[in-house]
Image (cartoon, rainbow, N blue to C red):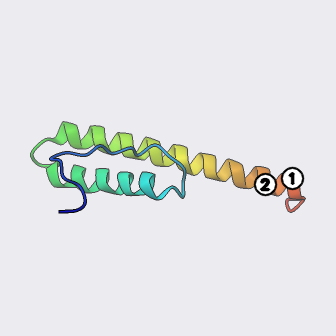
Amino acid sequence: MTGLQMKYFVLKPKGAFDDPYAKASRTALQAYAREIRDENPQLYNDLEKWRIEEQGAANEAHLMAKLESEDTDGSRQ
C-alpha cells in the first residue's frame, strides 16, 4: 500500500500565497468547516477565522513582495 497510512494528518495553512501545500491546507480547512457547520457552529467559526487570517497574511505578503519588486525594477511610477 502507498500514500498516507495513518488515521489523521496535520494541516498547515500558514504559508506563501503560491505555496501549493499551504493553499491545499486552506482549501481543506474550508471544506471541513463547511461540512461540520451545522454540527458544531463554534468549530466552524474558529476554523473559518483561522483560514481567513492565514489567507489574508499570504495575500498581504504576496502584494508587498510584488510592490517591492516593482519599486526595485523601476516599473512603478
Label 1, label 2: how far apart the Cα atoms are:
5 Å
Q: Residue at x 53, y 43 (%)?
A: 57
Q: Position of residue 31 (x, y in %)?
A: 26, 57
Judge the density around disc 1: few (<14), some (14-19), many (≥20) Cα neighbours within 10 Å.
few
Determine contact: label 1, label 2, CB under 8 Å: yes
Q: Which residue is mark 2?
A: 69
| Residue type at the position of mark 1 | Thr
Q: Position of residue 62 (x, y in %)?
A: 62, 52
Q: Which residue is mark 1?
A: 72
Could you tell me which secondary element the residue under label 2 belongs to?
helix
From this view, report whether residue 22 is shown above or below residue 10: below
Q: Quadrant of the N terminus?
A: bottom left
| Residue type at the position of mark 2 | Ser
Q: Residue at x 15, y 47 (%)?
A: 7
Judge the density around disc 2: few (<14), some (14-19), many (≥20) Cα neighbours within 10 Å.
few
From this view, report whether residue 14 is shown above or below residue 18: above
Q: Is residue 59 left or right of residue 48?
A: right
Q: Quadrant of the C terminus?
A: bottom right
